[in-house]
Image (cartoon, rainbow, N blue to C red):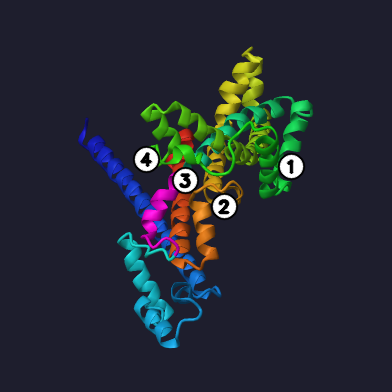
Amino acid sequence: MSASGQTLADHSRRNRFGRVLKSLSSFLVVICLTYLGLLAVTFFIGRVIPIDPVLAIVGDRAPEHVIAKVREELGLNKPLYVQFYIYLGKVAEGDFGTSVLTSRPVLQDIQRTLPATIELATLGIIIGAGLGVPLGVWAAVRRGGLVDQLVRVMGLIGYSVPIFWLGLMALVLFYAKLDWVGGPGRIDVSYEYSIKLVSGFLLLDTARAGEWEAFRNVLSHLILPASLLGYFSLAYISRMTRSFMLNELAQEYIVAARAKGLSETRIIWGHALRNAMVPLVTVIALSYAGLLEGSVLTETVFAWPGLGLYITNSLQNADMNAVLGGTIVVGTIFVGLNLLSDLLYRLLDPRTQTR
């Protein structure tokens, strides 16, 4: 290679490294600002709502001097910006405070309840995406047909019917009347204290221990709330898949593929769906995040001991440390899934890597 060619190659590598470094710096700045905004919003909302955490600790009949002393010990007598600064320091150390409701560190409570929510939401998104994507593809291919009309009706019901009402009706029918599934809760009491929790995911722990009877019991409790969440994600994913597929099927490369004599199956599943998966990955990731943060009503109806029920009970008992800690964790998961979907988007669509 000539000296001029080597110089151009070195210059090109330096430019590429500079672009990568600039992109990484921007990425880190966005992450820091996002988390700072999340912490600020959750903190100040927790301070301005008409719930006094001091009264939740000492009771509303405590003497004034006791209330003032506890308020001083908690730092609630200081200006809000000082309280926020102290709170940032504690969160950076992984300290979300102590729960008034359980008298345990909030982080321990979150570690105990989060696996239940993840287990529920994961099975829900598997059902939603596993059925929603094929139904959306079929609806787009048979536009105006029976499946297309069915997908539209399912989407309309999914957007219109309150999830708590549907959950109650499902419990009445499948549990109380037909006895096909387990009732509220995560597992029957007879199995609850015989299972050694390792990961916190009961399906995984019972299967690892070979406790297949307990595994079936856990699955019988899980399948109904997970199917309910899966249905609501299915309604959204199938409609979006249909929309993306209709857009792809109208492209010129589909006409060219048919002109070359490619089979309809290969055109639909090998070309159209492959290109539609680029934006669909983001839809599925955000749907999963929505199930993780939006399962509060489902967990309440089914008495599911997850993070959503924990936050709800904490809010009802003015346990603001637990509410703020749970909200931050949910927000962190949502931000993380957004970043993951963005990364997958870049991997699936090489055109974005050059921007």
- Specify whether residue 107 is painted magenta: yes
Q: Which residues are magenta?
A: 101-116
Q: Secondary structure at mark 1?
A: helix
x 42%, y 57%: residue? 30
In the rendered structure, the answer to whether residue 155 lies left or right of residue 70 reads right
Disc 3 or 2, which lies upstream in sequence?
A: 2
- The residue mark sitting in front, 1 or 3, is 1
Report crowding for label 3: few under 14, some 14 to 19, many 20 or more residues within 10 A (C-alpha).
Answer: some
- Residue 271 belongs to the span the image colors magenta: no
- Label 2, secondary structure: give it: helix
- The amino acid marked with disc number 4 is Leu
Gap in Å between the C-alphas at discs 3 and 2? 19 Å
Examine the residues drawn in magenta and state their main secondary structure.
Answer: helix
Alpha-carbon distance for marks 2 and 1?
A: 20 Å
Residue 114 vertical placement versus 313 (above, below): above
Is the residue marked by circle 4 packed among few (<14), some (14-19), or many (20+) residues within 10 Å? some
The numbered disc on residue 337 is: 3
Which one is earlier in the sequence, the residue at label 1 or at label 4?
1
* Mark toward the start of the polypeptide (4 vs 3): 4
Residue type at mark 3: give it: Leu
- SS assignment at label 3: helix
Residue pictured at 35% horizontal, 63% vertical:
91
Q: In the rendered view of the protein, which quadrant contains the N terminus?
A: top left
Q: Is residue 83 above or below residue 171?
A: below
Q: CA distance from mark 4 to mark 3?
A: 26 Å
In the picture of the structure, the residue carrying the numbered disc 1 is 157
Estimate the x, y position of residue 257 in percent, counting from the top left. 62, 19
Q: Earlier in the sequence, mark 1 or mark 3?
A: 1
Q: Which residue, given by chain and number where applicable, does mark 4 sit on?
A: 197
Can you say which quadrant of the picture contains the C terminus? top left
Q: Which residue is mark 2?
A: 296
Q: Position of residue 85 (x, y in %)?
A: 36, 73
